[in-house]
Amino acid sequence: SAMARRGDAVCCLGAAAAAGWVYLAEGGAHLVLERRAIAGDDANFAGCVLRLRKTTIKVGLDGGAEDDLESRTRSAHDTSKLTDALLWRDQPGFARDTACETPETMSLAFVENVMRPLLGSRFTDPGVYVTVDYEFLRAVAQSVTTERPKQRVDVSVIDMTQTRAVLLRDANLVDTKSHTTRLDAGDGESPNESENETFSVELKPKCGFVRDGSQFSVSRFAMHQRLKVTNGNVLQVSKYDPLDLFSTNQDDVHKALQALVAFPRNNLRIRRRSPNAQQSTMVFGEGVNAFTSLGGGEGTGSANEGSVTSTKEETLSSLLRVVQVALRESQVLPRVLSAQRKDRLGVEVLMERVKGVTDELTGELKLETRLKGELRDFVVSTVAKDCSVLIAIRRLRSGKGKAEETLALDETFVVSCPENKKGCSGDADAKYKCRVSVVDLDLKSIRNLAKWWRLERDVMQNWA
């Protein structure tokens, strides 16, 4: 059945609905639930994920010193009157009446009207609302506790006051019922085709360029890594370099993917969903490596067919070869890069400009059109530097699916990869059906400007 129009709330989720959702992942601001595979599931929810807002826990003692520093720097750089409503309300697609605005409505408007046109509708899904009640949130909060990473549990919880969550297509799946109606991809798959497992590779590429006129010729990621070592957050710097991943040279891209395997951290995660499994499992990432075999070989039904011939490493490298081809053919990274480049000024210059139009006594500020545009571009850039690119991959049986540059109606495409590194392209190539998505595009609040400015200063000082 066709899904509700954007912005319309789909039916309410109550306590009984909680059992249909399981923990998938979380970032700083949101926790994401995956829909369990349930036979005859409600078409509104099958193949979807649900994003719930989190709220931070104010930590007692160790949080105190931080707050003290915050209040000191805030008085020197008071941007409290600079709000998201002020920044975005005259943009097309945003509510004029800011009384109606919630973080969710602004974020949905932002993804749909700002990020989607930049990145392309084929890669982005703004989602729709679902109303959720307190009992649903309480049941979910209870069920996900054991799944959550300790460092997240200590600082944040699901926000029990939210009344709406965002429902999105599950980008970890190759074949999803889209929010409208399911279109036949028309690639001649047999009904049992989907018996092959699906892998999804999540890349968090970070900033892929060095600003013109920058005094350092190194990526911001590398500089931030060194600060993390200085602060004792990590023991050694990651060898991953975003400049390699965004490069047009395929050897550089290969090098970047290899570095991500060596240092996955939060920049590389791979999940697997078996056809009969109710949910996906993480098979590669920080502290996780569960690789056995990729796909079901030629589908003769022998369970260990793939694993006999391939070690874990070979399997992982074959998956990454598919990723590399999918990135090249989809051209998703140049789109992300151009969004990252929207900010021409940098946070230090913007901070100065905001201070320049702020009344020292009242904190009131006069935002003229140009500065408003520069601040919006900065937010877009910051979101694009922190988003994730998901490549969902399913191996096709031999002879199925022509490797076409053309997209099927459901926005999937087929790539061809040699079976092994030395293999020449040809009939022996394995074919994979892929879907590429950009996720985590939520609006970042301009209230973070002073915080971003402090981090930038720390990164620069530490590097110098």
Image: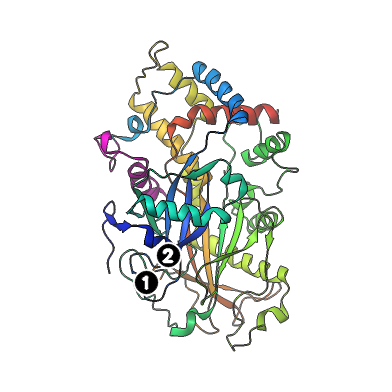
Q: Mostly what secondary structure, the magenta segment?
A: helix
Asked if labels 1 and 2 touch by Cβ distance under 8 angstroms, the answer is: yes
Q: Quick check: can you spot residue 341?
A: no
Q: From this viewpoint, which residue is outermost toward the right?
A: 235
Question: Which quadrant of the figure contains the C terminus?
Answer: top right
Residue 383, disc: none
* Circle 1: residue type: Asp
Whether residue 106 appears in magenta in the rendering, the answer is: yes
Judging depth in this view, the residue of 351 and 219 nearest the camera is: 351
Q: Secondary structure at mark 2?
A: helix
Q: Is residue 331 above or below residue 112?
A: below
Residue 20, disc: 2
Q: From this viewpoint, which residue is outermost toward the left?
A: 97
Which mark lies nearer to you, 2 or 1?
A: 2
First reached walking from the N terminus: tag 2 or tag 1: 2
Q: Which residue is mark 1?
A: 41
Q: How many C-alpha atoms fall within 10 Å of the one at disc 1: few (<14), some, or many (≥20)?
A: few
Question: Which quadrant of the figure contains the N terminus?
Answer: bottom left
Q: Is residue 428 above or below residue 34?
A: below
Q: Magenta segment, which residues?
A: 91-119
At x 51%, y 80%, the residue is 195
- Horizontal and vertical percent for residue 37? 45, 71
- Horizontal and vertical percent for residue 233? 69, 39
